[in-house]
Amino acid sequence: MSTFNITPKLLEQLCTVNQYRLRADELVFVGIRGAITALPNDNSWKSKHSLSLMDVNYTNPRCTLLQWRPKTGELAAFPASTVPHMRHIREAKQRDGKGANCLMTGFYTDYRKGVHNASKPSGHEAFRQNAVQPIRRNTDDFDFDKDDRIEYSNPFDNIHCGWFAGLSADAYASAGCQVVMGFPRCKKEGRTENVGPWRVFHKNAYSIAQQSFQYLLFSGTEVFSLGAGEKPKNAKLRYGSQGPLVAELQAALKEREFYEGTIDGEFGERTMKAVIRFQEHNFGRSGADGIVGAITAEALDVALQLAPRLEPGNVMG
């Protein structure tokens, strides 16, 4: 089992590599897919947390959600899942994938305070998805990969309480939402208080005036690689990237007639669709992940070169 420390500096470096421009004076949410925290019930603010890589199996919660204070360099870690549970995947397979989805990695700028499942007894204060986002839907098997179709929609993949008590739980409440360990205060009998890590996650966010939250979603392997000392010379662009390197990418796609939008330096839906069309054309569907790494950049003849030194925080607002 590969273990690594997640730190504010590492998150800043990830933002630099991915060209994410944060509102750095705010509380930020971070999802690490396929990495679990060593101390599930220690949700205190620290300068680092220990995580271990873990294969996602859609049955047990095998992810971590972080709350990050960029200005003070503090992190709090929470056991979580960032993928749908197998029960929903099986049901959705019979409905052309409808009813379960997997949010793609990227930078999402607007999760707002609000009620999840407001019309149900289980409804509780959470953080509501407030924009169209890229998701995958599965129709052929029981996991999510590059062969699964991509949609751009708002399926209300909120950040909310997961209704599970530990990392060994074999059930959690997600058909695509990002969910945190614990049980919520709601109208169901006996649920008068938030319980577990969710209590802390909720309190940290609901006790401040901030209404909208940025959410960074990474895979555990990419975080581990950078934390292990990888020194990337080039950016890796994906949904939510911003800046001149994105404009350079858009220009290259436009020159090859894959992109018809404005060269605005914003890696949004139109740019992602263009990247995927280019990747499918050059590498086949199995090579189309919507992320512009070294291979796609080379095929487009764009350098995407970072500054000579990888300085943390140089794309943060």
Image: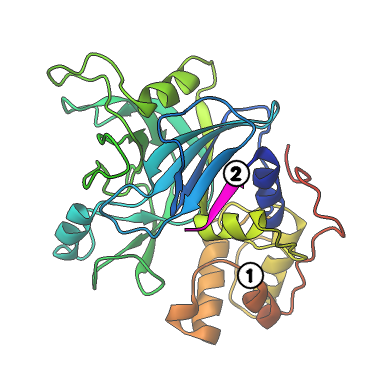
Q: Quadrant of residue 34?
A: bottom left
Q: Residue at x 64, y 41 (%)?
A: 7
Secondary structure mostly taken by the magenta-highlighted segment of the chain: strand
Q: Position of residue 248 (x, y in %)?
A: 74, 66
Q: Residue at x 58, y 56 (%)?
A: 224
Q: Quadrant of the C terminus?
A: top right
What span is colored magenta in the figure?
Answer: 1-5
For disc 1, the marked residue is: 293
Label at residue 6: 2
Q: Is 278 placed left or right of 40 in the picture? A: right
Say few, some or many: other residues with alpha carbon within 10 Å of mark 1 (under 14 / 14 to 19 / 20 or more): some
- Could you give the CA–CA distance between mark 2 and mark 1, rounded to whole angstroms? 22 Å
How many numbered tags mark residues here? 2
Q: Quadrant of residue 229?
A: bottom right
162 vs 267: above or below:
above
Say few, some or many: other residues with alpha carbon within 10 Å of mark 2 (under 14 / 14 to 19 / 20 or more): many
Q: Is 130 placed left or right of 191 in the picture? A: right
Q: Is 286 placed left or right of 61 in the picture? A: right
Q: Position of residue 150 (x, y in %)?
A: 39, 65
Amino acid on which the number 1 mark rests in the picture:
Gly
Q: Is residue 99 magenta?
A: no
Q: Quadrant of residue 166?
A: top left
Say whether residue 216 is visible: no
Q: Secondary structure at mark 2?
A: strand
Q: Residue at x 80, y 60 (%)?
A: 306
